[in-house]
Structures are given as C-alpha cells and as structure tokens.
C-alpha cells in the first residue's frame, strides 16, 4: 500500500475474497481514479462523501489482466517469494510493478483486477518530488532494465 492511497470501506475484504477464490490468483488489486493502467476508471468526486458514494457504486466480477500497479495490491507470501520479490534494482519506482506481474505470470499465476473495490490514488506523490530530469532518467533506466529482463518492448508512459 502506497502512502498516497486512501482506502474505502470493504477494500481489504474485497481483495482478500478475490485472492482466496482461486489458487491461480497471484496478485489482486482494486480499481482507482489514477493508476496508469487498466485499473483506472472514470471517477469524479471532490469530497470524502463523494469518494465514498463513488466506491459504493463500483461493481463487477474479478478479471484477469496482464499488469496492475502496486499502489495497492494483495498477494500471497509464497507467490511473492516464488516470483523473487521486488527487484530493488528499480530504485525509487517505475517498472517494479510490471516486473513483479511478469514474474508471477511466468509462474502460471494470474494478476486479477477487482472492479468492485475502489481505492483513491493520489498518483505520483512520491515521484513528483523528483526533478523532471531525474524522473525522466529514472524512467529510462528502469524501462531498459525491464526490457532487457523480459525481452519486451514497452511504450512510453
């Protein structure tokens, strides 16, 4: 859980239910207002009451996806260990979540989005502290690391 996430009622139980429902579920995560991936859903609220109303309206069955951001995620310890944990070579962030998801999928485990769970994300709160040149340099170094490891071509974010 990132320090820039704001959970809503039922978030833990919803993620835990999805993780527990299948032995193939390696990692589960919620939908959010800003994740930079398929978990981003349209959300407009300007107060805590509005956020809670929005979260109560979220519906949908868990679905397998290729990647989720680790701003808020749940996984079994044995899956985390089998995947080799988080590669600390990614430093302050960017691509460590892609890397973990690839490692889990390479071991036959699913990455699962839980549309009925909404968690607010003040995206990039940590990375915004970086100078724009430092941010770009970190992005490029981490992208190259990911592409070498997985022999994959990525698009810019």
Image (cartoon, helix red, strand yellow):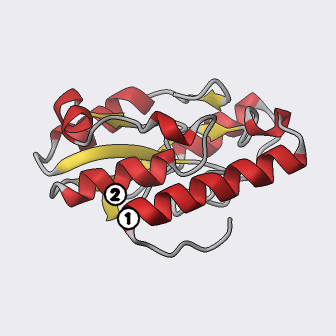
Q: Quadrant of residue 74?
A: top left
Q: Position of residue 45 (x, y in %)?
A: 77, 45
Confirm or deny contact between disc 1 and disc 2 (CB under 8 A). yes
Q: Position of residue 34 (x, y in %)?
A: 67, 51
| Cα distance in 3D space between marks 1 and 2 | 8 Å
Name the one closer to the observer, 143 or 114: 143
Q: Is residue 76 above or below residue 107?
A: above
Drawn side of residue 53 relative to residue 118, left or right: right
Query: Foreground mark, 1 or 2?
Result: 1
Q: Position of residue 154 (x, y in %)?
A: 55, 72
Mark 1, Cα crowd under 10 Å, few <14 / some 14-19 / many 20+, is few
User: What number is the disc on residue 150?
Assistant: 1
Q: Examine the rendering and report whether any part of residue 101 can be seen.
A: yes
Query: Is disc 1 placed on a helix, strand or loop?
Result: helix
Quadrant that contains the C terminus? bottom right
Q: Residue at x 46, y 45 (%)?
A: 30
Q: Residue at x 51, y 28 (%)?
A: 1
Name the one closer to the observer, 6 or 96: 96
Of labels 1 and 2, earlier in sequence is 2
> How many numbered callouts?
2
Q: In the displayed image of the protein, which residue is found farthest to the left?
A: 23
Q: Examine the rendering and report whether any part of residue 40 can be seen.
A: no
Q: Quadrant of residue 42?
A: bottom right
Q: Position of residue 5 (x, y in %)?
A: 62, 31
Residue tagged 2: 102
Mark 2, Cα crowd under 10 Å, few <14 / some 14-19 / many 20+, is many
Q: Quadrant of residue 108?
A: bottom left
Q: Residue at x 22, y 28 (%)?
A: 77
Query: Is disc 2 placed on a helix, strand or loop?
Result: helix
User: What number is the disc on residue 27?
Assistant: none
Q: Residue at x 82, y 39 (%)?
A: 128
């Amino acid at each position: 859980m990132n320090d820039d996430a704001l959970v809503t009622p039922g978030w833990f139980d919803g993620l835990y239910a999805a993780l527990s429902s299948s032995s193939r579920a390696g990692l589960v995560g919620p939908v959010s207002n800003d994740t930079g991936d398929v978990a981003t859903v349209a959300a407009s609220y300007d107060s805590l009451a509005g956020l809670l109303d929005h979260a109560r309206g979220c519906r949908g069955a868990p679905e397998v996806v290729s990647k989720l951001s680790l701003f808020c995620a749940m996984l079994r310890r044995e899956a985390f260990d089998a995947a080799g944990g988080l590669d600390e070579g990614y430093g302050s962030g960017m691509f460590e979540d892609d890397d973990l998801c690839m490692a889990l999928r390479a071991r036959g485990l699913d990455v699962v989005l839980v549309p009925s769970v909404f968690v607010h994300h003040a995206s990039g709160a940590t990375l915004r502290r970086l100078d724009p040149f430092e941010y770009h340099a970190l992005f490029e170094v981490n992208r190259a690391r990911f592409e070498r490891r997985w022999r994959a071509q990525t698009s810019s974010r």
